[in-house]
Amino acid sequence: MKIDTVFLFDSQINKQQNFHLLKQFSREEILKNSSNLSELLRFQTPIYIKENGRGAVSSPSFRGTTAQQTAFLWNGISINSTFLGQGDINNIGFLLTDNIIVKSGGGSVLYGSGAIGGSIHLDNSLSFDKGFSTQILSEIASYQSFTNVLKSKFSNDKFSVQLSANQSISKNDYEVIEKKYKNINGQYNNGSLNIALAYKINQEHQISWISEYYSGNQHFPIFEESQNRANYKTLNSKTLGIWSWDKERFSNRFRIAFLEDEFRYYQKENGLQSSGGNAQNLILKDELNYKILNNLSLNFLSEFQKNKAVGYLSGIDRVSRLVFSNAMLLKYNPTPTINLELGAKKESVQRIYSPWLFSFAGNWKVLKNFQTAFSFSKNFRYPSFNDLYFQPGGNIDLLPETSLQYEWKNQWRNKNISFIITPYFMNIKDMIRWLPTSDGYWKAFNTNQVYSYGIESQLVFRKKWGNHLLNSSLGYAFTKSINQATLMQLSYVPLHKANVGIDYQYKNAKIYIQGLVNGKTYTDTMQNELDALQPYFILNVGVSWLGWKNIEIGGKINNLTDQIYATTAYYYMPKRNYSMSLKIKI
């Protein structure tokens, strides 16, 4: 009998689950929130998402940090913007990924700059010995919204190929009458194409290749019909090649990647381009693992990057930098119940001082149903091209942000129930902020020291009996993120956030519920009560039925209770709205 094998493009992330809190999304969970990546992260993770209206400009706050302190990785390769230093959430083609993993806590030894609050991993996988299969999703929703996704796969014992494509389009013209708000000029249109291949040369060697292309046109909501109808167009491509070499005690994975990101901003629709830029990143990465003993292994990770960018009407004129890094991970299992990991890394960034980074983590299975893990790490983020070179305001004398983090994960599990609680503490120094100057423009400075601390917890219950299946989860995050200069909470960091998910299936029928509770959220650095976003509770309900010949039909009511709420000051989110979907498996 043949054994099915699966090739993962990101080989490191699943190894971190012993020490850190990981949330992994199945394909089914991803499609529950298919409108955009912001909605998925908002309803199913502890991350706070600041969104300028549905589908518009969006940024995350992970454990009380800024958007630039969350790393986005595509198959193990960083895709944070070279210009902004952050991931543009609603311009990421997440519907073509096979799984999404959210890792809480710092990870700069493994994932480099930006991995301070946490990291978000969008990964593809290829299976062998599976034959041919195709999945099709079509969804129609309120505000003239349409989403279509196609994923086709073929594999035998030597070769695997996957072709995926999607398009999302929406007029997005919702209203919140009680607040006299209409989402004028909120339309968007985006699409992506993904091609992945893998070939087994022999039992030891395999080559793989994956490319993804994304095109988006995102308009900026305005408050009055007379205002300029600005829009933002983006086009990016990502290509990754991998050569894998696996032996009994030795494995090596060499990667070469090329990323290109182009954006254009138009202050007036159909007018001349107002600003923009093009960034190109060449990345060479090697991961070597040697098993010294059955309970002792050593990993060496080396990476080279060449970042190039040119801006349009931004003062950034053909800049470039070289980035080198070398890291080592030592993994030791002194007993079957204890796992230890020690890591160190030195990153050399052209014209920027970079500190030594380190990590230490340990996991102890205290009892059959209980284990505890502790981690301590130093993480960092070096300045983006906008931080350094944007004119006016860029500052070439900036230092990297650095962070010391402590985390203590505790997990209890039995047959049906799993409970995890993780307290943490971060000390962030030299945070880069843009502040007003006496000359009338904003400039980047290394400013505050921030203490961010809190608790993340998750309770999961799963039960199957007869034709019934129940899955439920409850997540809660308490977050204090205090600017040590003012002793006040950072803006857009809610003190309390909770997520509830309930899935019930009987034979071919399913119903699921999503709940979100968000506490009071300040929108400025001085905790102005009048401008704060008030607490809210959002409830989504969906149903589906798997019918004839693998055809599944479904429907969903978003914001069932018609709650009025906003995640960014002045930009309200939709009230009650609806969607219907059709899924076909061949």
Image (tube, helix red, strand yellow):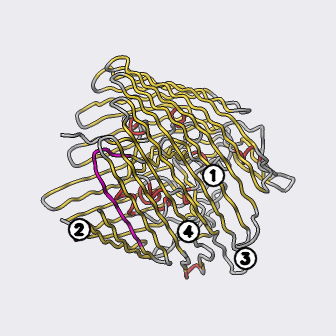
Mark 4 in CB contact with mark 1 (< 8 angstroms): no
The residue under label 1 is 261
How far separated are the C-alphas under marks 2 and 1?
Answer: 41 Å
In this rendering, the label closer to the viewer, 2 or 1: 2
| 3D distance between C-alphas at marks 3 and 2 | 51 Å
Q: Is residue 295 left or right of residue 518?
A: left
The tag earlier along the polypeptide, 4 or 3, is: 4
Name the residue beneath numbered marker 2: 549
**Mark 3 to mark 1: distance in Å?**
29 Å
Mark closer to the chain start, 2 or 1: 1
The kind of secondary structure element at disc 3 is loop
N-term-proximal mark, 4 vs 1: 4
CA–CA distance between discs 4 and 2?
A: 32 Å
Within the magenta stretch, is there residue 128? yes
Q: Are marks 2 and 1 in contact (CB under 8 Å)?
A: no
Q: Amino acid at mark 4?
A: Asn
Which stretch is magenta?
126-139
Disc 3 or 2, which lies upstream in sequence? 3
- Asked if labels 3 and 4 touch by Cβ distance under 8 angstroms, the answer is no
Q: Are marks 4 and 2 in contact (CB under 8 Å)?
A: no
Q: Nearer the viewer, mark 3 or mark 2?
A: 2
